Amino acid sequence: MKKLDKLIDGNKGWAEGLRQEHPEFFSSLSRQQNPEYLWIGCSDSRMPATQLVGLKPGEMFVHRNVANVVVHTDLNCLSVMQYAIDVLRVKHVIVCGHYGCGGVKAAMNNSKLGLIDNWLRHVQDVAEKYEASLSQITDKYKRFDKLCELNVIEQTINVCQTTVVQSAWARGLEFAVHGLIYSLEDGLLRDLGLCITNEEELLAARKTAPALSS
Ligand code: CO
């Protein structure tokens, strides 16, 4: 109960495997990181960010929270974004949600789970914003899928509207903001058709956002 032997042993095996593949892996990685991607994903244990896109340590900067929400006053998420964009100079910022998201489901069902209800209120705001199109979907599973997609789209737009991204674009930094969704059932990512690299593309995305989700 008090021991984490399974994890310590697992870590030894993992490090050994990487060392056998590339003997210099850890010594060179310990000197610097140069990731091209920032991933903002759900905390769900079934969504291991770096692994599911086949990247190695050092290749992706990661921020995760319940239901991959990007809130304009969340200093944690904003700090991760600012460091990734201004200091690490990532070329892609990815918001990745997933179908079957427990956070989105709780928001949709107005479940009372405790403190987290406050966090999921942001997903309820998304549901209310798209109430007209969501209410037309009679199948509750399809409606749930749709809200998972709309949440990614809204959070991707939120990324673009943060002071961090706005200021970086104003200073001429070049990077793209994307919205992806992951399926737990087949392990595959799906591109939601958002790729925003400047203010004009952001305005266009805000207009077409509802149509982007299938
Ligand atoms: Co989730």
Image (spheres, grey):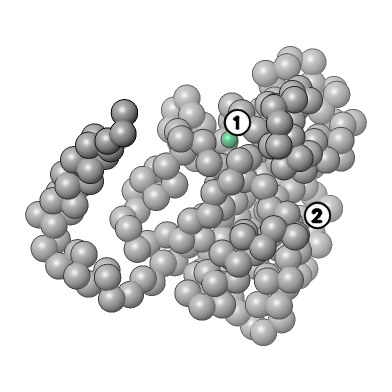
Residue at 74% from the left image edge and 15% from the top image edge? 139
Give the structural element (helix, strand or loop) at label 2: helix
Q: x and y percent of residue 49 in the render?
A: 44, 47
Q: Is residue 76 above or below residue 149?
A: below
Residue depicted at 68% across the width and 70% down the height = 165
The kind of residue on which mark 2 rests is Arg
Residue 94 is at least partly visible in this image: yes
Please tell me in which quadrant of the rendered image residue 102 appears.
Answer: top right
Disc 2: which residue: 206
Quadrant where the N terminus is found in the figure = top left
In terms of sequence position, does the residue under pointer 2 or pointer 1 come before the other? 1
Disc 1 marks a residue whose amino acid type is Cys
Q: Residues within 10 Å of mark 1 (few under 14, many from 20)?
A: many
User: Which image quadrant: the C terminus?
Assistant: top right
Q: Is mark 1 within 8 Å of ligand 1?
A: yes
Q: Residue furthest bottom?
A: 171
Question: Which is more toward the observer, 27 or 150?
Answer: 27
User: Are discs 2 and 1 less than 8 Å apart at CB?
Assistant: no
- Ligand 1 lies in which image quarter? top right
Q: Which type of secondary structure does the marked residue at label 1 adopt?
A: loop
- Residue 44, relative to residue 69: is it above or below? above
Q: Nearer the viewer, mark 2 or mark 1?
A: 1
Relative to 28, say whether 93 is above or below.
Answer: above
Q: Quadrant of residue 157?
A: bottom right
| Residue at which label 1 appears | 101
Residue 44, x across and y down, in percent? 51, 36
Looking at the image, which is closer to me, 84 or 176? 84
Q: Is residue 18 left or right of residue 58?
A: left
